[in-house]
């Protein structure tokens, strides 16, 4: 079976900017392809904690998140990223669970509220958002954390490091999909799903560029610590043609 050398440290919050952290989790298998996992955590203006695409709730990770403040929001950015939200919701029953487009159809989580094209008052003071529309298979909610100028994505960009990726099949699949670091982008199958909806996606890409991000955090693979606007322009050049 193909493998991927997990990012270290595991299940530990790493501060990457003003009031924003990432935590790397286990490597999961998806149709024979290994996917390292990563979540993003933001401390909001009101002192509450916002958790994007939570990974498996290892005890040490849960404790570290609790130390930041009360967990108030558990966010599913797309219909694939929901697997661990139920476990976090059980641990933090007062947190609001936020549903991405179509996630309710494939998840047993009883989501409280739905994400929209603009941020709710709960976090509008520091996080902006848009829904990347136009795909026949997957719509993703994209977030921008203003204080740290961080764009937060899930699957719209993947960036797998070849030296961490094991197995000829996995390496060939990553190369074919166009998601090998340092030039990762939207995987080919997801790009193809936008063929009839490219115009709808362009507005979201224009918004991402207008945000002028300094960094881009992604769920799978090496994230981008600098030159975020250039990363967006390159990774989404297929949209802007």
Image (cartoon, helix red, strand yellow):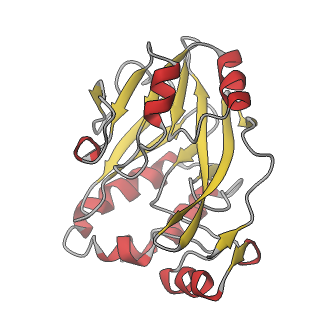
The residue at the far right in this view is 9
Please give left or right for residue 212 compared with residue 135 in the image. Answer: right
- Nearest the viewer among 116 and 205 is 116
x%, y% of residue 103? 29, 45
Whether residue 1 is situated above or below residue 23 in the rendered picture: below
The quarter of the image holding the N terminus is bottom right
The quarter of the image holding the C terminus is bottom left
x%, y% of residue 83? 44, 44
Whether residue 175 is situated above or below residue 83 in the rendered picture: below
Picture residue at 51% right of the left edge, 37% below the top:
52
Task: Choose top left, top right, bottom left or bottom right for residue 197.
Answer: bottom left
x%, y% of residue 5? 75, 65
Picture residue at 41% right of the left edge, 40% below the top:
76
Task: Choose top left, top right, bottom left or bottom right for residue 23.
Answer: top right
Please give left or right for residue 78 compared with residue 40 in the image. Answer: left
- Nearest the viewer among 122 and 168 is 168
x%, y% of residue 131? 32, 47
Whether residue 181 is situated above or below residue 232 in the rendered picture: below
The tally of labels here is 0
Picture residue at 29% right of the left edge, 29% below the top:
110
The residue at the far left in this view is 196
The residue at the far front in this view is 1
């Amino acid at each position: 079976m193909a493998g991927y050398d997990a990012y270290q440290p595991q299940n530990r919050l790493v501060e990457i900017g003003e009031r924003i952290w990432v935590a790397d989790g286990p490597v999961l298998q998806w149709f024979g392809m290994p996917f390292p996992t990563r979540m993003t955590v933001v401390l909001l203006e009101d002192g509450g904690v916002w958790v994007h695409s939570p990974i498996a709730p290892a005890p040490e990770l849960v404790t570290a998140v609790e130390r930041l403040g009360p967990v108030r929001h558990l966010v599913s950015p797309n219909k694939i990223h929901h697997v661990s939200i139920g476990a976090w919701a059980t641990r933090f029953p007062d947190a609001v669970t936020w549903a991405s487009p179509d996630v309710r159809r494939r998840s047993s989580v009883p989501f409280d509220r739905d994400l929209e094209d603009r941020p709710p008052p709960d976090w509008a003071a520091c996080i902006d958002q848009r829904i990347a529309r136009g795909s026949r298979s997957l719509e993703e909610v994209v977030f921008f954390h203003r204080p740290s100028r961080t764009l937060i994505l899930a699957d719209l960009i993947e960036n797998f490091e070849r030296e961490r990726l094991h197995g000829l099949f996995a390496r060939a699949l990553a190369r074919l999909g166009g998601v090998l670091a340092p030039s990762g982008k939207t995987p080919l199958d997801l790009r193809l799903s936008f063929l009839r909806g490219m115009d709808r996606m362009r507005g979201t890409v224009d918004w991402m560029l207008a945000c002028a991000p300094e960094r881009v955090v992604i769920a799978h693979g090496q994230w981008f610590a600098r030159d975020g606007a250039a990363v967006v322009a390159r990774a989404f050049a297929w949209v802007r043609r």
